[in-house]
Image (spheres, grey):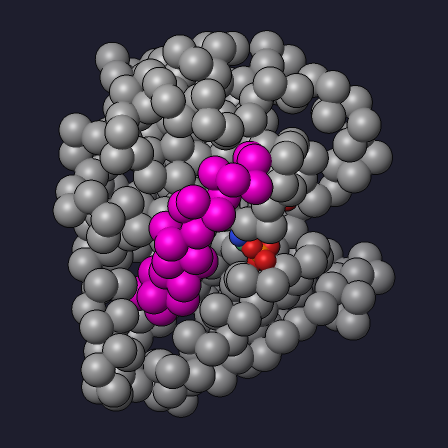
Amino acid sequence: MKHLLKMLDLSTEEITEILDLADQLKYELKHGIPHPHLKGKTLGMIFQKASTRTRVSFETGMYQLGGYPLFLSSNDLQIGRGEPVQDTARVLSRYLSGIMIRTFEQKEVEDLAEYGSIPIINGLTDFCHPCQVLADLMTIREFKGKLEGLKMCFIGDGNNMANSLIVGCLKMGMAVSVACPDDYQPPKEILDFAAGYDCFELTNSPEQAAKDADVLITDVWASMGQEGEAEKRRKAFAGYQINDGLMSVAKADAMVLHCLPAHREEEITEKVFEAHAKEIFEEAENRLHAQKAVMVKLMA
Ligand code: CP
Ligand code: NVA
């Protein structure tokens, strides 16, 4: 494993190794056991979109590992004025030990990896959000004790979260059921991958998708960059909400996850959100541990 660009690139074994290491690093942090695996290393963090969790968890995580994080806003980098990513990659590779990037196009992340010579970590693109899904898998395993054989249901937009969840959960032996409006299905690349699995289902019925689910997950109706479509999307996604009605068709002990930020009373009701706050905020915490594991795997 040289980079973390998308879940499609990871094997089941690699995902398991990251989750195991993340559990260990979480234990060490909670018990005050130092783990300076990245002493003397530097991580550049390029952000072309807003972030609370990704920025703070990578920055803190790098510090806890003994390394040094650099926050690089695209507003301040020459990349924001049009310097090609190919050149940025070759320059930054001479200063840094690794790069985390959050941007729009997946191609930009893939180009950084191709032209640079250091590990690249995808901190979210329009196509996928692998760091989040590693934290989600870690959280499911923590609460349920296993992944294999569980059913994950995703409700809402066939977006970056849906894409990474479909791939990550299927690779870990879970059944996956996705409910989205017909015009907002995941892209062909993801559906082609999922077509290889009998335990994958795509429907426009949230009730059908949620039936007997062990884990229900949703995400915002309008992602970063889609603010102009918010009104149109509010109409298209009406009904694609995790609420008490939907919870009643899932397993009685079903857990609920949300990558955050959440829009209460849109994709999830306040009531369900607060009833499952324990899982949702553990999930947010696990970003830290999962990403530290990724950085150690790639950069130590
Ligand atoms: N879930 C997530 O990636 O959060 P941020 O946008 O705050 O980083
Ligand atoms: N789908 C959301 C996820 C935010 C973490 C977005 O891209 O804005």
Measuring from the top left, give residue 56's x and y in whole percent.
54, 71
What residue sits 20% from the left and 44% below the top? 144
Q: Quadrant of the C terminus?
A: bottom left
| 40 or 66, nearer to the observer | 66
User: Does 174 appear above or below 83?
Assistant: above
Ligand 2 sits in quadrant: top right
- Magenta highlight on residue 281: yes
- Magenta highlight on residue 144: no
Residue 94, quarter of the rendered image: bottom right
Residue 160 visible to the viewer: no
Measuring from the top left, give residue 208's x and y in whole percent.
40, 11
What residue sits 41% from the left and 46% below the top? 276
What residue sits 83% from the left and 35% below the top? 228
Measuring from the top left, give residue 272's x and y in whole percent.
48, 38
User: Does 210 appear above or below 162?
Assistant: above
Residue 210, quarter of the rendered image: top left
- Image side of residue 76 versus residue 206, left or right: right
- Image side of residue 236 versus residue 136, left or right: right
Measuring from the top left, give residue 102's x and y in whole percent.
60, 55
What residue sits 54% from the left and 62% below the top? 53
| 235 or 28, nearer to the observer | 235
Please state the extent of the stretch shown in magenta in the rendering. 268-294
Residue 58 visible to the viewer: yes
Q: Quadrant of the N terminus?
A: bottom left
- Image side of residue 133 versus residue 151, left or right: right
User: Does 24 appear above or below 165?
Assistant: below
Q: Main secondary structure of the magenta part?
A: helix
| 275 or 14, nearer to the observer | 275
| 97 or 256, nearer to the observer | 256
- Image side of residue 101 versus residue 233, left or right: left
